[in-house]
Structures are given as structure tokens and as C-alpha cells.
Amino acid sequence: MSFSRYAFSKSRLFLVPSPPFSFALNLNFSSHSPNPSNIHDALASFNRLLLLRPLPSVFEFAKILGAIVKMKQYLTAISLSSRAQSKGITPSLVFLSILMNCYCHLGQMYFAFSVLGKILKMGHQPNTITLNTLMKGLCLNKMVGEALSFHDELVAKGFLFNEVSYGTLINGLCKAGKTRIAIDVLPRIERQGIKPDIVMYSTIIDGLCKDGLITEARDLCSEMIELGISPNIVTYNSLIHGFCSMGGWKEAYELLNEMFRKYINPNVYTFTILVDAFCKEGRIIEAQAVFATMMKCDKKPNVVTFNALMDGYCLRNNINVSREVFNKMVKNGLAPDVISYNVLINGYCKNKMIDKAMDIFKEMHRRNLVPNTITYTSLIDALCKSGKISQAQNFIYEMHDRGHLPNIITYNTLLDTLFKRQHLDEATTLFKKIVNRGIQPDVYTYTILIDGLCKGGRLNYARQIFQQLLMEGYRLNVQSYTCMISGLCKEGFVDEAMALLSKMEENGCLPNLVTIETILRGLLEKNDNDKAKKFLLEMTDRGLFRKMTFVLFRTPEPMISKVENTCVVTFLESTVYYLQETNGLEYMILKKTSLGHRLLMGDQGFIIPLQIQIILRHRLLTGISEFTAALFTVFATEKLIVLHT
């Protein structure tokens, strides 16, 4: 969009301190146009003005249009402005600016700039409110590139903006995810003789935090302080929320203490951010401490705060305390919202207390709260897991009846249950319905489908779907590939499974423990021991020590004995590597034994006797702690017989 066709006289623009668009909203109505409280009153007042003779001034019409804009009835305001002009009303700058504002809110920026052309054609000089309306309109409609061009053209013509204009531009850039460009605007502001203020800095800091650039946000805050601009509660809240979003709850808590040291009173939002962050990290004691501090500061927690605390207790499987928090919230005079009930319902469902969850669901109805998709999905998931498929399906029907269309997560839950209970025909029919209803299956849907078909003996159908997804370039995850590999191995197509493993890696998806174990088992079950040994060593050479350790943990002793002592040595090396990575007490003990030291130093000159292999294998099947205990016992007592090759 080019703005060069609009000719502006050179002057300095000074914006009024009130927010944009308020110029037509705060005017008192005369006797001709009493202040309308709703759209019907406004229309009646406007029509009365049109019937008066002589016609009232344009000022009276502009006041009613301003009130209609305040009601967000933009199309109505545009229509009425056309009627007024058709009756001979000559639009004023205020009148046209209201019209421009309507087009901006409707996203019709071409028409908004057409109004600017009309302003100039009529000989009006655009004021700061008019130009700022266009600036904000461009930003609201995510046309930040055009907003920057508009700014640059105006500056080139001699216009100088003030803090409000630049605040609008910076806010638009940050909301559009162009925070770095907003940072670049700061020195340009200073070159115009304007000092960036706390609002501009806080807006950019908030944008950086939302982009996950928390270090840059903190650095910019430090730079701001060096310039003599003190952070306010908005700045701190953005930083605290940013750190919490990145798991930096320690830094967030330190910022809270910094606020106290600087006598900046945290608000309810500040405390709620921290309560929520601690709860999500499972640190319920710290969350309680923040909650207690909040109460001491006489900041009354709101529904969001209580919801966060309730959720924290549910995450710790302490549903009873979560219910107590719920009751306390009600006792404090707060009305629980849908999220409050969802937290309780999900908590009861996770604890397999479906009857309690259903009681809460009924309570929602009694309080005239409308359950949402999350409510239904929690209940459907619990019912499916408890085998009550018909009840789960009834909830699906109820969702449709109430206008809450199930999302793909809801359908995935039901689809997974149908496959696990071997209702293959019903499951495949449901999948077709999902697609026909225009709901886009996600990677989990396809994984459930492929896994269910493979386990249900319909490998060809699964293979057909999988190949189609690969041809379409669909990004499958490691679980999807592993399900297909497992299905192929189960039917004896191990070579095809290994080819798919290569294809998987070519597509940038690395195998996990289950993938490797699946192929290893497939090779061993086919008695292809040489290939199994080669596969193990290849995986080890590629640095998958830790994965191979756990694969060998899970491989039965009769199978692992097929790949000879060499792989058991590899197994021990892998375990030591894992212990080195964790650098725990077990590793410290291991390296103090002579044979342990030899193994740590990479001595390959020994073979573990089969009898000790079997003992270790029997012990390790229960997990790594059992294995390491057995291993340390052998090493510490020096009973491991070493046979040099």
C-alpha cells in the first residue's frame, strides 16, 4: 500500500493524551440527541435528527455515530453516515475520522485510506487522532509492514510523532511477533527527539518474553534501568510470566522478592502467575507459600488463582485437598467457573473415581454452567479406560446435541479404546466419520489407527495408510514409525522393517528404545543371530549406548544368549556409560573397584562367564537399580572371573 498520493503539509503532530478513537465517545449529548443506551435508542435519535428542519449541525450526528461505534456497531455507523451525507450533511473531520475508525475495525484498510483521501480533498488537515487511527488500524490488522512504511513516509514529509503514536506502533509490532523490529524502532524514536518511556519498554519486554527470549528481555530491562527508567508492575509481571513459562521459577521468585525490596506491590496477577508455575512444576509447598504471602499482602485470590492451586493438588493426586480448595473458594464468595469444575472432574477421572466426577458434572448443570469440550473429553477418557464404551459414546452424542463438537483429542480417546478392545470395524467406521465431518486427524490419530490395525491382524490396511501418509509428506513421529515396524516384525517382515527404520532416519526421525528393541526381537525370533549381533554393534557404534543398555535389560535371557558374550560386554559397557552420564553414587562406588576400573578404562580383554551372565540377567529384569546392585556386588567382592582371550 502506497501513501505517496496523499499530500500532507509539514507540521509537527502532537497527540492528545486520551486514547485513540475516544474523541467521539466522550462528548455530552444535547437535547436534540440524548445519550442512547442501546442501538435502538441510537437509531431512533439519529432518525429524529434527520427529520428536524433545519437539519442540526454535523456535530450532533457525529455524537450519535460515536456512541454507536462505542457499541461496536461499525456497519451500522457506516450505513448511517452514508444516509446523513445523502441528506445534505457535510462531513467534518471528526465525522470522517469516526467513519475511518469503523473501516479500521472491520479490517477494510483500503476504504479507511479512501476516507483519508476524502479528508484531504475537502481541505481538512488530518490531526494526530486521524493519523493515529490509521496507524492503529494497520497494526490491528497485522499490516505492521505497512504501518512502518506509513510512519516513514510521514516522517519524511516532516511529521513528528510523540509517545502515543510510537506506543501504538511498538504494540502492533510486538503483537505481530516482530519484537526485534520493535527494538530497532527505539533508536529511531530517540532520533526524533522523543525518549522511549516505560510503556514502550514494557511492551517490548512482554513481547520478548512471549517469544521465549527471556534473557534478551532481562537484558533490555537492565538497559532500561540504566537509562533511569524504573520497571513497574507490568514489567515485572511480564518477566515473571516469561521465566515461569521457561521453567525458571527460581528466577521468577527472585523477581518477586526484588519487587518487595523496591516497594513495588505485586498484584493478584503476579501471585497467580507464581502459584500456577509452582503447581505445574509439582512444587505444591512453594505454591502454598506464595498463596499465604498473597493473603498477608491483603491481595484476595481470584478464581484463576484458586483454579491453579486446585490443579496443583490434582497433579499430585491429592484430589481431596483440591476439593477443599474448591470449597474454600466458594466460601470466599467466588463463583467457580467451568475451568474450576474441569479441574475437579479431571482429577477424579485420573484417580478412577468416575462416580465422583459424574456428581461434579451434574453439579455444573444445577449451577447452569455449560460444560465445554474439555469437560466431556475428561469424562469420555475415564469411561473408555473403565470399559464403559457405550456411556462414552452417549457423551459424544450429547456433545453434538449441545453444540459442543468433539475435537480430535476426544475422538482419539474413543478410537484408541475401540482398537484396544478389538472392535476393529467400529473403530475404522469411526475414523471415516471423523474425516467426513471435516475434522483433521493428527499424528496421534494415525498412530492409533496404524497400531490398532497391525495388532488386529490387518497389516495390509495399515501398510496402505502408512505408505499414503509418506507419499503425502506427512510428518510422522517415532511412535507412528515404531507401530508400523512392530506390525511388520510381528508378521515376519523384518527386512522391510529395517528398511523402514532407514527411511525413518532419512526423514529426520530418530528411533527410540522401543524401535530398536522391536527390530532386535524380530531378528532373534527369526533366529537371524548374526544379523542381530551386527545390528547391536551398529547401534552401539553410533553412540546409542544408553538405548542399548535398556534394550538388553528388556531382552529375555534365552534370546540374548544367542548373540554371545561380546554383546554382554557391550551391555556392561553401556551400563557403565549410563552411570557415567548420571555421575551418581553407584558410579563413584564402581570406579573404586579394580575390575570396575578396568571396565571404565575400556579393557576389552575379558568375557563374562555364562553363569554370571544368567545371574545378572535374572536380577536386572526388574530394572536398572537391581542390575547395578548385582553388578556392584560382583565387582566389589572381586568374584567376577576374567577369562582373557
Image (cartoon, rainbow, N blue to C red):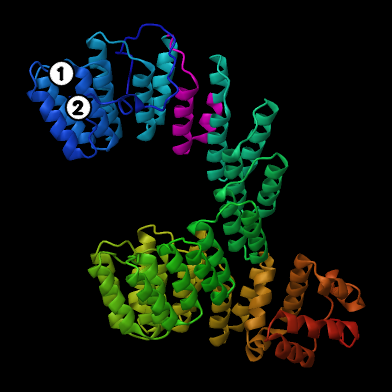
Residue 478 at what x, y percent from top left? 50, 67
- The residue pinned by badge 1 equals 56
> Which is nearer the eye, 143 or 364?
364
Let me know if residue 643 appears in the view. Answer: no
Residue 431 x %, y % = 30, 72
Rendering coords of residue 582 (x, y %): 76, 67
Residue density around tag 2, few if under 14, some if 14–19, many if 20 or more, within 10 Å: many
Q: Residue at x 39, y 17 (%)?
A: 128
Magenta region, residue range: 158-185
Left or right relative to 436: residue 561: right
Q: Magenta includes 176?
A: yes
Residue occupying the far front of the picture: 31
Q: Is residue 72 above or below residue 394?
A: above
Task: Please indicate, yes or no, whether residue 353 appears anywhere in the rendered image.
Answer: yes
Q: Amino acid at mark 1?
A: Pro
Alpha-carbon span between mark 2 and mark 1: 10 Å
Q: In the picture, which quadrant includes the N terminus? A: top left
Label whose residue precedes the other's in the sequence (2 or 1): 2
Q: Are marks 2 and 1 in contact (CB under 8 Å)?
A: yes
The residue shown at (67%, 60%) is: 289
Which secondary structure lies at badge 2?
loop
Front one among 231 and 487: 231
Main secondary structure found in the magenta portion: helix
Q: In which quarter of the view is residue 82 placed?
A: top left
On screen, residue 38 versus residue 424, left or right, reads: left
The quadrant holding residue 583 is bottom right
Q: Which quarter of the figure is the C terminus placed in?
A: bottom right
How far across and down, in percent of the image, does residue 64 sit?
A: 22, 28
Kindly identify which residue carries mark 2.
33
**Number of dots carrying numbers:** 2
